[in-house]
Each structure stands twice: as C-alpha cells, then as structure tokens.
Amino acid sequence: VIGGCIGAYVLTSISGSVVKPFIIAYLAAMGVYVLWRAGHDIKPRYLRSWMVAPLGLVGGFLDAAGGGGWGSTVTSTLVGAGQEPRRAIGTANTAEFFLAVAISATFVWSLMTGHWVEAGALEHHASAIGGLVVGGLVAAPFAGWITKRVSRRVLTYAVGGLLLVLAGFQGLQLAGVLA
C-alpha cells in the first residue's frame, strides 16, 4: 500500500512511459525464470518474511507507476522465488483490494489538489476504466476456482507464459508496432 501510494504520486508527477520499459523488461525476465523453474520441476519453498515486505513495496510502486502490474509483478516474483502458485496467486489477489483502494485514493487526492496537471483527458478513458473494474470483479472468483483445480506445474507454466505474452504485447505497443 505504501509503495502504491508513492507510485501513484510519482506517476502524477512524471510520464508513465519513462517507467514502462523497465517494467516490461522485468516481467519478461521473470516470465523466462518462472518457465525455467516449471521445466525443472523445482519444488516450492518457504519465503522469509523479510523478503515479502520489500516485494510488496516494489510491487505496489510498479502497479501504480507502471499503470498496472501488482498481480504480474508480485505473483511472478513469489512464484519465481519458489512459492507455491496457488498461495502466490491467492496472496496477491487478497492484497490487491487494499492496494487498489490506496492507489485510487492517492489518484483522487492528486486530482483534487491540482497536483496531477495532465489528468484533464481522464474523462475520455472512463469506459476503459469501467471495463477493467467489471472485468476484475467477474474474473476474481474464477482465479480461486482455477487455482484449486489446476496442478502446481501447470499453474507455474501458465504464470510464466502469461508474463511473456504480456511483456511481448506491451513491448510491441511501446515500439509502435501495435496500437
């Protein structure tokens, strides 16, 4: 939540396009690493608590500053570090609610105080924002259902593959190949 608030404040101060290439590179690297772990069938391990707090701080920052990425950043890092995919997905989804509330409050505060000068065109994106909210509400119950029924190895491959697809798609968008 702290990282998300800082990221939202920073995003309202600079262009998100400055941070996006770094997030894309990180997601691609994590996707490769998670796929490697799945292919070598490395068993899950316990993560120490001192590792989780910095991950949450960075994940929250990247989610707000990068225009999304809590789930992909935190889930992929947890899976890459050896956490069981079910636990990583459940943990990230549970914390995401609190993160979203904090980031949204920071963005609203930035709008209301006049700190976010470039937000004038925000009303043009209301349908996209509404679609993301509705999609998230519809998809959330399926995430829990899927993680109960799909094997750890398949989930690990799915997380790694999805990361590579998302990083590739965003990379092509950034390069101007896709609109």
Image (cartoon, rainbow, N blue to C red):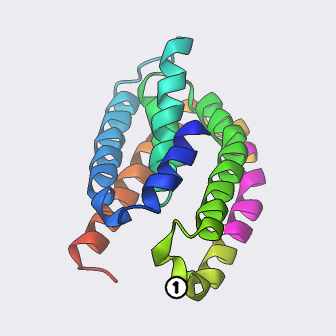
Image quadrant in which you'd find residue 152: top right
In percent of the image, x 48 and y 49: which residue is there? 7
Image: 121 above or below 97: below
Q: Position of residue 173 (x, y in %)?
A: 31, 73
In this figure, what is the number of numbered marks? 1
Image: 84 above or below 17: above
Residue matched to label 1:
121
Q: Within the magenta stretch, is there residue 175?
A: no
In percent of the image, x 71 and y 59: which residue is there? 139
Q: As drawn, is 177 to the left or to the right of 43?
A: left
Badge 1 density bin: few <14, some 14–19, many ≥20, Cα 10 Å: few
Q: Quadrant of the N terminus?
A: top right
Q: Which residues are magenta?
A: 133-144
Q: Position of residue 48 (x, y in %)?
A: 52, 11
The amino acid sitting under disc 1 is: Ala
In percent of the image, x 51 and y 69: which residue is there? 116
Q: Position of residue 73 (x, y in %)?
A: 46, 43
